[in-house]
Amino acid sequence: MAFKTIIEPFRIKTVEPIKMSSVAERKNYIKNAHYNPFLLKSSQVIIDMLTDSGTSAMSQNQWAAMMQGDESYAGAASWERFYDAVNDLTGFEFVLPTHQGRAAERILYGYLGGKGKIFISNTHFDTTRANIEFSGATAIDIPVKEGKDFDSDYPFKGNLDITLLQQLIKKHGKNIAAVIVTVTNNSGGGQPVSMENMKAVSALCKKNKLLCILDCCRVAENAYFIKHREKAYANHSYRQIAQQMFALADGAIMSAKKDALVNMGGFLAVADKKLADACMNLLIITEGFSTYGGLSGRDMEAIAVGLKEVFDDDYLNYRIKSTAYLGDRIKQHGVPILYPIGGHAVYVDAKKLYPQIPVHEYPGQALVCELYTTGGIRCVEIGSVMFGKYNKSGKLIPAPQELVRLAIPRRVYTQSHIDYVIEVFDEVLKNSKKVKGLKITKEPQFLRHFTAHFERLK
Ligand SMILES: *Cc1c(COP(=O)(O)O)cnc(C)c1O
């Protein structure tokens, strides 16, 4: 018998209160935050879907493990448990603990990069691209063309375009510093990469003696999609699938703030001793000694446990199904979304929802503000506020899409919270014709979406 309700596979033992608020209060809060939800206080938010990064709820076993945190400077027992967990999952001999994903990126890509070097990925995540470009190197994205078609139900839109990869290898040869496979493809909508694609990338890298790195932030979520969409893996466990992916790479970078189910942490793991030694030097200079890097003993304990828990069948089933539940429902109710739904977030097409708002009046930001004032939901615009640029005469060059991302924190919200979000969308849909855009009144030079101020257009 298949019941429709997605039961959270956990009971709640510690509660974090949510402060309720009225529409009138929220109108005031968002005005004072200059219509930028990044400037709201978390206490002014009812459902926080800003990001899935570092927002997971930890389990009783993670909290219990933290009490065993060994904070010795060198050779701590917590380090041994962390090393064993990472080594057992990834198979890589050399493990460098870092305070979050971007620290691992700075170390590895800073070392491999530099002027004239090329990095190739399905899509470089923004911190990945920033660290590569900061080193002077170039980052090239080669997602498959199906990844850009939002109505096709191609099952692995996170895949790399193998023909393009072959062409780039021919063209750039030894200047290619690494090929980075990001699972799931965060910037591409949390879409999965197939094992078949990973095998093809790995084979090309081996043949051409290129380094293949797995950006494995969401490797467990990716394994779910492989098991359910790639026939050959239907009888593998999620963990075995992840282990096979690691076996096809030469190293991995992880932001533990995602699939390690913790609030802070990361690592770099590699197979090659020479590469590990070079990175270790940078680790000790900028993060910390090799047996703790950027982490306290208790953090390493929580990650070691989280890396096991995340592969639990019941957890992954709940995780991916509850993301799909939100996406499917709002789609049925008439909200235009990107399809298929990825692992950690639902993306709404704000340009389709608000055809009356031109891109230079930021339809995505308008939706973000509507969701907040209507229901206290906080989410983020991924469109021309985030990626728009100006030409020489000060005219906006818009982003390719005007999206709004609803990211789902792990193990935090229940189905009733999600049902509430669906109801808020119904209300937002009812009023969609009346909504107006915004203009930017103040903005910094870089990463303007974090701190920009807006005004509502009349
Ligand atoms: C979050 C993320 C990173 C960066 O990790 P931080 O822990 O935020 O520094 C790198 N790559 C991908 C795919 C990510 O999602």
Image (tube, rainbow, N blue to C red):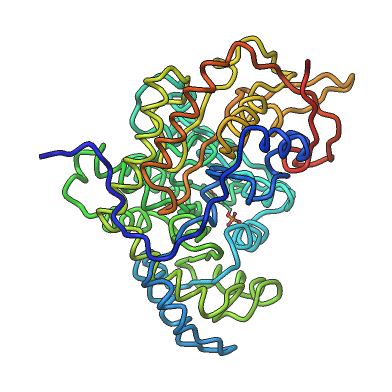
Q: Is residue 82 above or below residue 221?
A: below
Q: Residue at x 45, y 67 (%)?
A: 271
User: Image quarter for residue 328?
Assistant: top left
Image location of residue 127, percent across then percent down = 64, 49
Image location of residue 231, percent across then percent down = 20, 39
Image location of residue 4, percent across then percent down = 22, 36
Residue 328 relative to residue 352: left or right: left
Residue 438 relative to residue 162: left or right: right
Q: Residue at x 62, y 27 (%)?
A: 370
Farthest-out residue, left: 1
Residue 361 relative to residue 126: left or right: right
Q: Is residue 372 above or below residue 218?
A: above
Image location of residue 20, percent across then percent down = 56, 45
Q: How many marks?
A: 0
Q: Is residue 263 above or below residue 305?
A: above
Q: Residue at x 58, y 74 (%)?
A: 295
In front: 327, or 71?
A: 327
- Quadrant where the C terminus lies? top right
- Quadrant where the N terminus lies? top left
